[in-house]
Amino acid sequence: MMRTKSFDNAVSPVVGVMLMLVVTILIAAVVSAFAGGLGGSQTKTPQATVSGVYSMTNGMTISHDGGDTLSAIDLQVYVSPTNVWGPGSEGRTYVINKSVMMTNNKIWSEGQYQAVKKFGPGDQIIISKGNLSVAQENLYGQGVVKDTTSSAFYNTSAVGNTIVIKFYDTKTGKIFATSAPITIQS
C-alpha cells in the first residue's frame, strides 16, 4: 500500500489568518468611518469674529468682521455686562430682540416673518437710539428668565461700563463668537 501525504493541516492556519485579516480590516473601516465623521451627522458650529460700538446718542452697531456667513434664522445675538458692573454681572445675558435689529435697511424679523436670512462678513446690525430701550428681550441668569424689564444698558448711568456681544447658534446650542469688551459711550 502506498501512502499519500495529506495537506489538510496546512489549510486550517491559512483560513484562520484570512479570517483574522478580514476582521481587522472591518474594525479599521468602522473606526475610520466614525473618526472621519461618516458615522454621525453632527451640525458644524459656525465661526465668526464680531465687534461693536454702543453709544447712548447714536445707538448700537454690531459688525460681522469675518468667518462664516451665518443663518440669521438660527442666530441669536446676546449682550452681557462685564465684571466692571459688579461681582457676578458677567453671568447675566440679554437676548437682543430681532424686531429692533436692522441690516441693509431691513428689520430682522417682525412677528413670524424673518426678513434677513443671512448675515455675512462685512454686514452690520444697527439698533437705533430709539430702540435701545427695547433691545433687550429677556435677562437670563443660569438659564432662567429673571427679569424682562431691565434698563441696565440704556440709561446714562451705564456710560463708561463695558459689555460684550455674543453670537449664539440655536442649531448647535453654542455661543460661537464673543466680542472684545465694548465701552458704552454717551
Image (cartoon, rainbow, N blue to C red):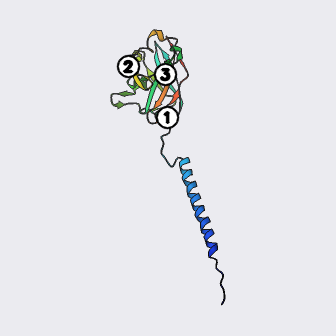
Q: Compare residues 75 and 61 and report the one nearer the observer.
A: 75
* Element assignment for label 2: loop
Q: CA distance from mark 1 to mark 3?
A: 28 Å
- Vertically, is 15 above or below 110? below
Name the residue tied to disc 1. Answer: 69
Which amino acid, by three-letter code, is at mark 1?
Thr
Which amino acid, by three-letter code, is at mark 2?
Thr
Name the residue tied to disc 2. Answer: 148
Q: Give the image location of residue 29, x and y in percent.
A: 56, 54
Q: Compare residues 185 and 76 and report the one nearer the observer.
A: 76
What residue lies at 54% left-to-right and 53% top-to-bottom?
A: 30
What residue lies at 41% left-to-right and 25% top-to-bottom?
A: 144
* Identity of the residue furthest to the left in this view: 111
Mark 3, Cα crowd under 10 Å, few <14 / some 14-19 / many 20+, is some
Q: CA distance from mark 2 to mark 1?
A: 31 Å
Q: Which numbered disc flags the more N-terminal residue, 2 or 1?
A: 1
Name the residue tied to disc 3. Answer: 91
